[in-house]
Image (cartoon, helix red, strand yellow):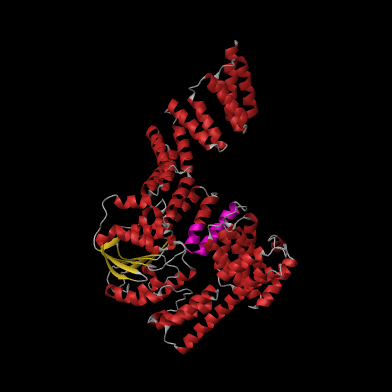
Amino acid sequence: MNTPDRAVIYHKQAIEHLKEGKLEEAIACCNFALERQPYWPDGYKTLGLAYQKQGNFEQALIAYTNALEIKPDFAEVYGNLGSLYAEHKLWQDAVQAYDVALRLNPDLVGLYRNLAQLLIMFGKYEDAISYCQQAIAKQPDSFKAYYLLGNALSGLEKWSAAETAYQRGAELNPQCDRIHVDLGNMLAQQGNWQPAIAAYQTAIKINPKNELAYHKLGNSWFRLQEPEKAISVYKKAMEINPLTPWSHLPLGRSLLEVGKVQEAIAICFRAVELNPNSYWAYENLGDALSRNRRFSQAIPIYLQALQKVPEDRPGVSKSLYRQLGYAIREQSQADVDKASQWLSEMINHPPDHNWQKLGLTKQNPEPYLQLGEMLAKNYQFEGAIAFHKLACECQPKNAEILEKYQNICQQYQEFEEKISSLQLATQEDSTSPKPYTELGNLLSEHNRLDEAASYHRTALKLRGWDVSEQRNYRFTRDWFSSNIPTWEKNLHHLAGIPGFQALEVGSFQGMSACWLLDYILTHPTATITCIDPYFQPEFNSNIAQTNAGDRVIKIVGYSQNILNSLAADYYDLIYIDGCHLATVAFRDALLSWRLLKVGGMAIFDDYNVSEEDDQEQEAKRGINLFLEKVKDWVDIIDEGYQLFLVKTGDGFQPGELEMLLSEIDGPLQAYY
């Protein structure tokens, strides 16, 4: 047998070995073939593929390079190179290799999909869509092309088109569970929780071992504040993979919400082991220990959580400082000296590894000063004073530290005096709601929530909301009731209208929604849709007390995702009390405009709040920009702390509103 014939035989054997996963044998056969026919590009291509499957990047690259030196227009080798680069996260090289391969041979359909997948990773959704469409044109039954098309369209928030693509992919491959998971993710992003749940359940039906589908299903129930259902699903995910890092986190919180404190503690400890860098894992554990009144254990856990919070999550830090302050106050029975003495003992003689891991010493006062200052900013003065005392112990002769300690003590004294003054005001004039509201909000800052709720209940009754006491609403914060006279003046003519549709962006504990249900949305066919990314636990119970819960549509999610999916020209009243950043206020106003009927009313909260230090925090700036765009199609009927307007015309030309919304992706400062 001549040499070329033997080379062909060895090459065929190499291909068979590759199919069987016998990589060493495949490599040996390729080398035998290339010894007999050294300028054979197909041999180098197969050799490169064998090395690639073996995980040998360098040798695979050499083999593919040799193939291209012999045959520079070898499209399939460029395709393999793209896959090799992608496997080793050399993304740009992968894109370039795929691009060359397709220019050489546009019929390599799989490479369109590979390129689309990479471009989706980079957020280049338009380009990814183009490649998916080319793949579909060449191979109309490619379920993966439709699946990737759905991902790319979802990235552009083209929800309807994305759903169509996902559904077509699922029709082409009914056994692909991942399509249903990603469809569920897209629906969840829009706040369409029930369809999302159905999608996850379909994925589980296809593949009962799909841990991710169980986790996502659990997250859906968690966001809908259905902890019992969430618990069941998270536990199923953990049966499939006991080491799953993420299901432990919300499972611990869900167990805590249903009062299974001991089980929650065990799960939260495990969550910390599996997620050692997650502040949420430590926060959940701290809360579980506090609920069990194990404050001495909760305190170092909260301190570790604070060390792990990213700088861009100030809201998380605020919550943690309040929880830490509460734990210190309870541990010391509100005795500042006792708190300081106890903390000093824990730091000097750490009783366990949780204290040791904090890295606190008696030589460096800075961590104590920082903790003390942040606790004071969040009205947790007992802890603030205790940590400042520790700083003084580190450097007892440091006048600057002593001055800071004295300032914190002064702030605490003023805080207590403010509480006493407000309590006295309630006694001197028991008919004025204002001191009750202020006192409730101040006590809420101090994490004295039961006392706060009691004062707010009295304030609401004094403001004429008698039914609030009868229905036993529980509100621990009140930013709304001072606006009731303005609402009564501007909304009274809307009471009792059949089929009246209201929309609220930002609901918190449901105070404004409850008032609307009690006084405006009184007809049995009137409804309110409430949007909030994180409804407070009190929301559900408060709405239930209205006896109109069946007329409340609760949508969990962010306004920018939800408002786009709601029906146009549908709502008679829209109340916008979401994020108060100027950029977000402008966007919420634009998104809400198409939803509001001509003749409908919109209310904007915090219109006259000034933030001199950071104007981007002013909702008014975003609202005013919106008013410039619609000034010819609105009547302003009230302008104060809140802005009330009536829509008198549609205004925008086709496509104009969409263009304005697309520009918000850049900094809002460009508009000013």
Residue 619 versus residue 298: which sits nearer the camera? 619
Residue 348 versus residue 500: which sits nearer the camera? 348
Vertical placement of 1 versus 152: above or below? above
Residue ID at (56%, 24%): 65
Q: Is residue 294 visible?
A: no
Give the image quarter of residue 253. Answer: bottom right
Report the magenta residues as a range.
Answer: 219-240
Residue ID at (30%, 71%): 638
Residue lying farthest to the top in this orientation: 2
| Left or right of residue 188, residue 63 in this image | right
Q: Position of residue 549 (x, y in %)?
A: 39, 70
Q: Is residue 138 visible?
A: yes
Q: Position of residue 92 (x, y in %)?
A: 51, 36
Residue 226 is one of the magenta-drawn residues? yes
Residue lying farthest to the front in this orientation: 399
Q: Position of residue 625 (x, y in %)?
A: 34, 59
| Left or right of residue 549, residue 121 in this image | right
Q: Position of residue 286 (x, y in %)?
A: 62, 66
Residue 192 versus residue 384: which sits nearer the camera? 384
**Which SS does the magenta portion mostly show?**
helix
Quadrant holding the C terminus: bottom left
Vertical placement of 39 versus 184: above or below? above
Vertical placement of 258 versus 417: above or below? above
